[in-house]
Image (tube, rainbow, N blue to C red):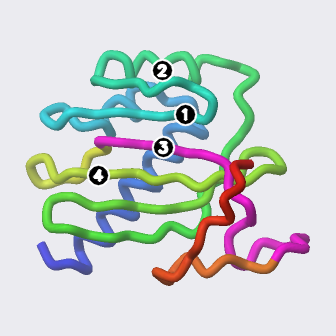
Amino acid sequence: MTTTDDETALLQANTAFYNAFVTHDFDAMANLWAKAAPICCIHPGWPPLIGREAVLEGWRRILNNPAQPSIQMLAPRVTLWGDVALVLCFERVEDQYLIASNLFVREGKGWKLAHHQAGPVAAPPPGEEGEDEPEPDIGGDDLTPSGTIH
């Protein structure tokens, strides 16, 4: 597979992850996570979930919660390192934005999640309307943390 094919497949896998989240499809969510590689998931405000059983139980609880707010994935960006890839993206949850890192590993001919972490971000992704803050440059290596945790 070429890098372009990998990037396309990774963006599709990342989108499938958020589609499973939005549709509360536990089976689809479970199929997206790696089976051979160790996995971990860190939801905002939760302790780390380590191992397939803990990660899937966490997702079962989230997806079965009728009060779970809707989520929208925005501005995904792929970084590829051979059989490991990182997709950074924003999540809009109601009127808040989070930044998420989704680490994928190649298993067989497909890409599977090995790690997901989301947390607060100081500014929305580029192009989101109605924000007074300047748009962050998520493409550069010159980002300096403000030192403030939101």
Whether pointer 1 and pointer 2 mark residues with C-beta atoms closer than 8 Å, the reply is yes
Q: Which circle marks residue 104 in the picture? A: 4
Which residue is at 77% across, 72% downward? 128
Residue 57, position as x, y percentages in the image? 43, 16
Residue 3, position as x, y percentages in the image? 20, 78
Among numbered discs 2 and 4, the one appearing first in the sequence: 2
Which residue is at 33% across, 70% downward? 79
Q: Which circle marks residue 117 in the picture? A: 3
User: Which residue in the protein does label 2 denote?
Assistant: 58
Q: Which residues are magenta?
A: 114-133
Q: Secondary structure at mark 3?
A: strand
Amino acid type shown at disc 3: Gln
Residue sitting farthest toward the left? 108
As measured in the structure, the alpha-carbon distance from the residue carrying label 4 to the one carrying label 1 is 17 Å
State which quarter of the image contains the N terminus: bottom left
Residue sitting farthest toward the front? 147
Among numbered discs 4 and 1, the one appearing first in the sequence: 1
In the displayed structure image, the side of residue 12 where residue 138 appears, left or right: right
Among numbered discs 1 and 3, the one appearing first in the sequence: 1
Label 1 or label 2, whichever lies nearer to me, is: 1
Among numbered discs 1 and 2, the one appearing first in the sequence: 1
Q: Secondary structure at mark 2?
A: helix
Circle 3: is it few (<14), some (14-19), or many (20+) Cα within 10 Å? some
In the displayed structure image, the side of residue 16 where residue 148 appears, left or right: right
Q: Which circle marks residue 43 in the picture? A: 1
